[in-house]
Image: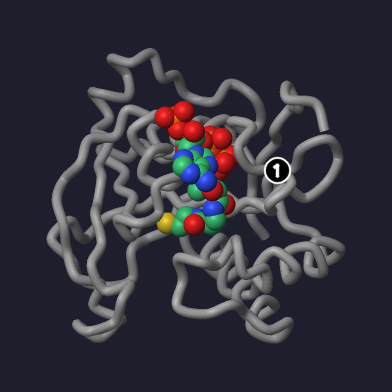
Amino acid sequence: MAASARVILREWREADREDFAAMNADPAVMRHFPAMLSRAESDALLDRIQAHHATHGFGVWAVEADGALAGMCGLLRVAFEAPFTPAVEIAWRLRPAFQRRGLAAAAARQALAEGFGRLGLERIVAFTVPANEPSWRLMERLGMRRGGCFGHPRLPADHPLHAHVWYVLDRQDWLAQGGAPAVSRPPRGH
Ligand SMILES: CC(C)(COP(=O)(O)OP(=O)(O)OC[C@H]1O[C@@H](n2cnc3c(N)ncnc32)[C@H](O)[C@@H]1OP(=O)(O)O)[C@@H](O)C(=O)NCCC(=O)NCCS
C-alpha cells in the first residue's frame, strides 16, 4: 500500500463483514479493549453501527484505502454519562496493515469536517486509556485538547481499563486550525 493511499469514508457493505470481523478479532488491534470480538459479536457491532446511522443520520463509517477495508472511523453519541456528556465522540480503529501511515488522521479529518460541517456540532470529544498512545497522540495531532480523566462507567473501578483520558475539539478551534466542511458528497450510513 502506498503511503499516500487515498482514504475514503463510505457506507458499509455486506462484503465488509469478514474483514471487519478479522480486525475485531486481532489481539494487537484490540489490546486496549476489554475483549476481542467473535464473528457474531463483530456482526452485532456492525448492526449497531448501522442502527446508529439510521437513528441519528451519522455514525461510524467504513474506511477504505487502496480499494480495501482499512478499518472504521466516525462519530457517535456517547451512550453513557461522563464529565463531558452529552457529547458526540470521534472513534477510530484500523487493521494492522493500515496503521502508522497517517491514514487514521486523514480519515478523522473527514469525520471532523462532517461533524462540524454538515452536522453543525459545537464540539467533538474523544477518549481512550492512557496506555493507548497511538490513539491519544492522534487526538493531539488533530488539535484536540486534553479535558481530563474519568473512570469509564461501563468497567469496574478495579478493571485495568477503567481509567480514561478525554480530549475535546471545539468548533472555533477546528475553524482556527484551518478545518473546513467537507466539500465532497457526505458519507451516508444505511
Ligand atoms: C489508534 C489508531 C487508529 C491510530 O492509527 P494510525 O493510522 O496508526 O495513526 P497515525 O499513523 O495517524 O498516527 C497517530 C499518532 O500515533 C503515533 N503512533 C502510531 N502507532 C504508534 C505506536 N504503536 N506507538 C506509539 N505511537 C504510535 C504516530 O506516530 C502518530 O503520532 P504523531 O502524530 O505524534 O506523529 C490505530 O493505532 C488503531 O487502530 N489502534 C487499535 C484500535 C484502537 O485502539 N482504537 C482507538 C480506541 S480509543
The foreground one among 110 and 148 is 148
Local secondary structure at mark 1: helix
Residue pictured at 25% horizontal, 42% vertical: 168
Percent of width and height locating residue 125:
30, 47
Q: Is mark 1 within 8 Å of ligand 1?
A: yes
Percent of width and height locating residue 71:
67, 52
The foreground one among 186 and 34 is 34
Residue pictured at 32% horizontal, 19% vertical: 175
Percent of width and height locating residue 93:
57, 54
The image quarter in which residue 185 lies: top right
The amino acid pointed to by label 1 is: Phe
Say whether residue 122 is visible: yes
126 displayed left or right of 27: left
What is the total number of numbered labels drawn onto the structure image?
1
Q: Where is 174 relative to 150, above or below?
A: above
Residue pictured at 60% horizontal, 62% vertical: 28
The image quarter in which residue 176 lies: top left
Q: Which residue is mark 1?
A: 98
Residue pictured at 63% horizontal, 43% vertical: 99
The foreground one among 98 and 91 is 98
